[in-house]
Amino acid sequence: MSSSSSLGKFILGTLVGGAVGAAIGMLLAPRSGAETRELIREELDNRYRESSDALREKSDLLKEKAAAFKDKMCDLSSELEETGRKTVSRLTDAVKKTSETPS
């Protein structure tokens, strides 16, 4: 198991544990049920917005990297095509010279 995988599992466990602990704490707090439900709803809304924002940022970053990768692959493809054309041209010239040379 890689260390990044272990770290990811640890972080996920910490977040889940924190959320469960916070929910239990709110449920056991001396508030009315309506107040507690409203606090839970607000907290979930906040977490949802934070998660959405983080996901949007990662998505934008991934799109940027994909576009850069595409551009690089197009450049490499063009270079390869040009190299291929030059190679074919040299081979064609070499074959012509060979066929023109008297035996």
Image (tube, rainbow, N blue to C red):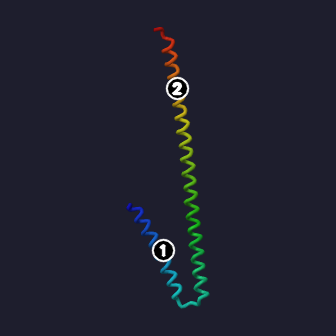
In the image, is residue 54 above or below residue 84? below
Residue 8 drawn at (x, y percent)? 44, 65
Work out whether residue 52 or residue 1 is closer to the camera in this orientation and state it: 1
In the image, is residue 95 above or below residue 6? above
**Label 2 sits on what residue type?**
Val
Query: Residue 16 shows which numbered tag?
Result: 1
Determine whether the residue tagged by mark 2 lies in a helix, strand or loop: helix
Label 1: how many Cα within 10 Å (few below 14, some 14–19, many 20+)? few
**Label 1 sits on what residue type?**
Val
At 45% from the left and 8% from the top, the residue drawn is 103
State the image quarter where residue 1 is shown: bottom left
| Residue identifier under label 2 | 88
At 50% from the left and 27% from the top, the residue drawn is 87
- Residue lying furthest top in this view? 102
User: Relative to 22, is 2 on the left or the right?
Assistant: left
N-terminal-most mark, 2 or 1: 1
Residue 60 drawn at (x, y percent)? 58, 57
Residue 48 drawn at (x, y percent)? 58, 71
Determine whether the residue tagged by mark 1 lies in a helix, strand or loop: helix
State the image quarter where residue 77 is shown: top right
Label 2: how many Cα within 10 Å (few below 14, some 14–19, many 20+)? few
